[in-house]
Image: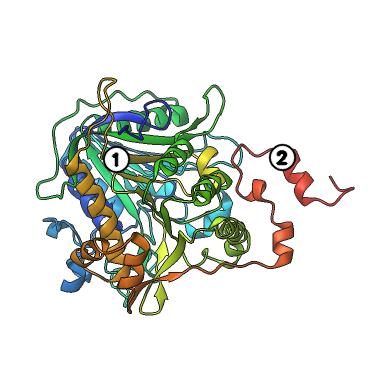
Amino acid sequence: MHTILEDGRNASLAHADKGAFLVDAANYYNAFMQAARMARQSLFILGWDLDSRLVLNREADMESSEREHIDAPAPLEDYDSIAFLSFLNDLLAKNSELQIYILNWDYSMIYALEREAMAAIKFAWQSSERLHFRFDNNHPLGASHHQKVAVIDDSIGFCGGIDLTGQRWDTRAHSTDGLGRQRPDGGAYDAFHDIQTMVSGEAARWLGQLARNRWQRACGEVIRPTPSRNIWPPGLQTDFQDVRVGLVRTDPEWEDRPSVQENLSLFGDAIARAKHSIYIENQYFTSDAVAGFLEESLHQESGPEIVIVTPKACPGWLEEATMGTLRHRIVQRLRHADKHNRLRMYYPEVEGKDIFVHAKAMVVDDRFAFVTSANLSNRSMGLDTECGMALDAYPPPVSSEQSSLRTDIMDAIVKFRNGLLAEHLGATLESVEQQLTQGSLIQTIEALQSKPRRLLPLETGSGTILDDIVPELQLDPEKPIQVEKILEDFLPIGEK
């Protein structure tokens, strides 16, 4: 069997010495702190949003039952309840050779109320001269920098869906009492589910080069690579090792740069190759192209089951009225195409409260896993900058020979998917594995449904008026926005 990953088509291939799936932000922040403490020369951070007040380590606020859901408890007693910026300053104080580069999206004013005020000034006033903070607006009109990347000494790299900002931290328990879930301003927020990946070796060096390229594009400054080291935080879990992975980007055409649409290509290639099951978690579902890939699969008389886990609703009335309306259109398309009853769409709930799904992940059969920053939206497929990591149990060979099955990689992928199901169903990993031996993915989910943790059928809807007036290609564009087109869509005739 051939690998799904193709260098230059749907990914850039690089060798990972070690790698891990970090489910939910408590695990990512824990791993980030452990890795960052090993930095000697450079630490790069790219974000859609960053907050200097973010409390990284909240174990002191948790009960013992919550701590069990942090995969790798770290010896970080000296960093209890430490804020993000304070942690970075401590790293700089302890290592005079360390340089930290932070690149944050120069965001639209639409998001101003959700973000830390005057972030650039706070970083500059309260930080070392070796902490370099910049806003990045080097992108087309209407685009955003949506990559969530951190790289330590070109030796350990993180990418996926989690930003180092407020309203992200949670454990896999998603407790209803909200222990630890406080925003930097002190307010509480609801349960939040997300995923990040971690790699070392050549894959980390690739992420380092991505970060330096972004820095040069935004700031005009060339940062030299850091000599990489063979490092991994002691005691931190390793899910896979010694394998070529795919690093996957979206980068819009801009100035002299060509468009890169590897996320779109990989979603299409992986869905087309699925035989038994497609499991997807994603915050949005408005991508016309991805819906087309899934429609084609559903039309097959004998094809894979498709399970999609997504939020119950978009946050806020405005987003629900716009992106929620676009999602309703896609859901209706897919349900109409589901002639063979192979599609299920769910949202997770715990004790009557829904869990917000911010994750962007896909697992195909027992052989392919993909974690990315890219939403299943038009803009994530072509307009915004995105970055993810993909793993195939038939990894790309170094030569032109056919791929061989790596059973250890397959086991890691199966454990990753089954762990997500166990988390959402309030079940043990063993019970999910046992149930899958007796039935399909959908049958397993339905068999294990029980309160207080469960996956409930997604219901969507929109008014006829909204269906008529919500313009898909302006609210969720896949190409740079043209001002003339916006005026044409929104202004009455005679006022253009």
Q: Could you tell me which secondary element the residue under label 2 belongs to? A: helix
**Which image quadrant is residue 223 in?**
top left
**Residue plotted at (26% across, 61% down):** 436
Front residue of this view, candidates 445 and 172: 445
Residue 361 image position (x, y, % from top left)? 38, 50
Front residue of this view, candidates 302 and 390: 302
Q: How many marks?
A: 2
**Is the residue 226 above or below the residue 76 in the image?**
above
Tag nearer the camera, 2 or 1: 1
* Quarter of the figure with the N terminus: top left
Front residue of this view, candidates 31 and 200: 200
- Indicate which disc, 2 or 1, sits on the residue closer to the N terminus: 1
Front residue of this view, candidates 254 and 295: 295
**Is the residue 51 above or below the residue 180 in the image?**
above
Calculate the distance from the C-alpha at mark 2 to the C-alpha at mark 1: 40 Å
* Quarter of the figure with the C terminus: top right
What residue is shown with label 2? Answer: 483
What residue is shown with label 1? Answer: 391
Q: Is residue 249 visible?
A: yes
Q: Label 2 sits on what residue type? A: Val
Left or right: where does residue 172 sit relative to residue 162? left
